[in-house]
Amino acid sequence: MTALTALLDGLVDYAGLFPPAALPMDEAVRNYAAYRAGASRAMLARFVLPVARLEEFVRAASVLPSEQRSASPNASPADSAPWPLAVLGGASDAATLDAFDATHGSTWRVDTVEAKAEDAAGVAALAAAFGGRRTVYVEVPANREPAYLIAEVGAAGLRAKIRTGGVIVEAFPSPMQVMAFVAACVSLGVPFKATAGLHHPLRGEYALTYAADAPRGTMYGFLNVFVAAVLLHAGHAPGAVMPLLEESDASSIAFTDDALRWRDLSATSAQVAAARATFAGSFGSCSFMEPVQDLAALSLLPTSR
């Protein structure tokens, strides 16, 4: 596995239901089915939805041809595997998710739960509800020092989540806040995922929604965040990695079969694979094709439908 392959494998959780795309359920479900069978399926991970829309999801997905309902995202469409779902919910939804899996688990399976907690009590409630039975990502507010709550998340056997953007400029945390979160996760040994504002590979100014008159703002790139996470996990110091979060020069990041390199810092392919497997999970994006097409434009992927 090359460094680039290891970095991109299962990196994108498809959140087409959420802003700025905010697609209808049937359209988002059809898109996900097509992406699972497409040329870039190795990048695709889970389908993201709120717990309150599970039955709506079942209705939309049930009308798909059977081969689309069971195609594995990282293998040929003929391989059978349940769709992995990332469900946004809370501790009170544990029984609902158990019932869903009992009824539909052979076709659609709740792979992860994404929840919010403001304090240690909220983390404890999630741990009590889901225990070791599910992978749970706890959203940690980026606007305050994150280490305390991340420590509580890790001690409970859960994982951390950071919101890296939104549809307004104020929704984007500062580079220092992103670095504080990722560095704390490294030092405490807590895996993480990110969500929102990472449609593009590199930091730059982009439209914040798909409206014709959309405001523009500076967005992080998913390569910025996840290459930074890999380098931190490989042992590079936060101060040395910090400028990467504001990097906009594509030529500064290079991939070979054996390593990735950003300027003077590098990680081996094995270190990339280890970071992705045990630490840097995925990011939620309301678009799957924007990341794919932007990578193709950087000659990091073949042009894909």
Image (cartoon, rainbow, N blue to C red):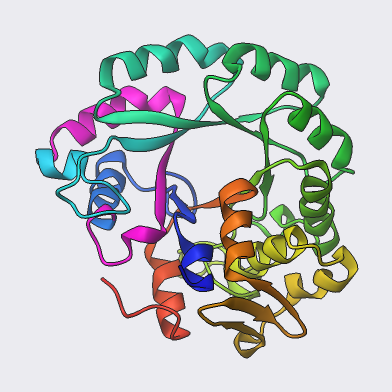
Q: In this view, does 5 lie above or below 191?
A: below
Residue 60, given in percent of the width and then of the height, sits at 22, 34
Quarter of the image with the C terminus in it: bottom left
Extreme residue toward the left, this view: 65
Extreme residue toward the bottom, this view: 251
Q: In this view, does 230 lie to the left or right of 39?
A: right
Query: How many labels were placed on the picture?
Result: 0
Whether residue 10 is in magenta: the answer is: no
Quarter of the image with the N terminus in it: bottom left
Nearer to us in this view, 193 or 77: 77
Q: Residue at the location (87% across, 41% down)?
A: 147
Residue 107, given in percent of the width and then of the height, sits at 24, 30
Q: Can you see residue 23?
A: yes
Q: In this view, does 10 lie to the left or right of 260?
A: left
Q: Can you see residue 166?
A: no
Nearer to us in this view, 100 or 9: 9
Q: Residue at the location (42% across, 14% down)?
A: 98
Quadrant assignment, res 189: top right
Q: In this view, does 193 lie above or below 39?
A: above
Whether residue 48 is in magenta: the answer is: yes
Residue 62, given in percent of the width and then of the height, sits at 17, 31
Quadrant assignment, res 96: top left
Residue 238, given in percent of the width and then of the height, sits at 86, 64
Q: Residue at the location (82% across, 22% down)?
A: 120
Magenta-highlighted residues: 36-64
Q: Is residue 163 above or below residue 49?
A: below
